[in-house]
Image: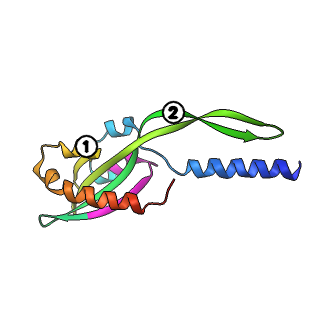
């Protein structure tokens, strides 16, 4: 095998390995979440879904733990160049995602709310409504501080 072929294979492996580290949450997983889901079951439901950020928010004398994940909302095809002896353009599926938040009361870890920022903003629960302004602010700061993907 030539050095050029080994280099191309190594580059493709590193490119694919970088993509494989991020696992989005699926609608099937979200469908299994309920207000009665215990923390241990919630972690099992989330499985290997990547938590992009986690932080605590204090509001009205209560602490809430928030986890942000990427929820897969669809797929699009992206053209990538794969080079072996020749270079070819191939279509590769790429997940389309949106931010998805899980809010737990602390220290009980009771699940208070889950959904996109828009869904949570429309939630009728006054506790969720009271923390949403602060949650948006903290989440926006976390997104800005996160390294680019």
CA gap, disc 1 and disc 2? 23 Å
The image's colouring method is: rainbow
- The stretch drawn in magenta includes residue 128: no
* Crowd rating for badge 2 (residues with CA inside 10 Å; few <14, some 14–19, many 20+): few
Toward the viewer: 99 or 27? 99
| Looking at the image, residue 134 lies above or below residue 89 | below
Residue toward you, 25 or 48: 25
79 and 64: which is toward the camera: 79
Which residue does the numbered mark 2 point to in the structure image?
76
The numbered mark at residue 118 is 1
Q: Position of residue 75 (x, y in %)?
A: 49, 33
Q: Is residue 45 visible?
A: no
Q: Which mark is residue 84?
A: none
Of mark 1 and mark 2, the one earlier in the sequence is 2
Task: Write the residue at 74% across / 34% down.
Answer: 88
| Residue 47 shown in magenta | yes
Q: Secondary structure at mark 1?
A: helix
Q: Quadrant of residue 135?
A: bottom left
Of residue 124 and residue 86, the one placed in the foreground of this image is 86
Mark yes or no: residue 101 visible.
Answer: yes
Residue at 51%, 33% (x, y): give it.
76
Q: Picture coordinates of residue 8 (x, y %)?
A: 77, 48
Binning the other alpha carbons within 10 Å of mark 1 as few (below 14), some (14 to 19) or many (20 upward) gives: few
Determine whether, in the image, residue 69 is placed left or right of residue 103. Answer: right
Q: Which residues are magenta?
A: 41-56
For image coordinates 76% across by 48% down, the residue present is 9
- Residue 61 coordinates in the image, percent (x, y): 12, 67
Residue at image location 20% in from the left, 46% down from the top: 121
Give the x, y percent position of residue 104.
24, 55
């Amino acid at each position: 095998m030539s050095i050029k072929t080994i280099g191309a294979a190594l580059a493709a492996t590193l490119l694919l390995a970088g993509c494989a580290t991020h696992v989005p949450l699926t609608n099937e997983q979200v469908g299994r979440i309920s207000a009665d889901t215990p923390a241990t079951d919630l972690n099992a439901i989330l499985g290997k879904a990547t938590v992009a950020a986690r932080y605590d928010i204090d509001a009205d004398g209560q602490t809430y733990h928030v986890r942000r994940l990427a929820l897969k909302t669809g797929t699009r095809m992206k053209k990538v160049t794969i080079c072996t002896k020749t270079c070819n353009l191939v279509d590769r599926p790429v997940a389309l995602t949106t931010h998805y938040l899980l809010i737990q009361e602390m220290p009980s870890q009771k699940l208070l709310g889950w959904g996109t920022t828009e869904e949570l903003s429309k939630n009728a629960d006054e506790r969720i409504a009271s923390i949403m302004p602060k949650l948006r602010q903290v989440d926006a700061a976390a997104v800005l501080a996160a390294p680019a993907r």
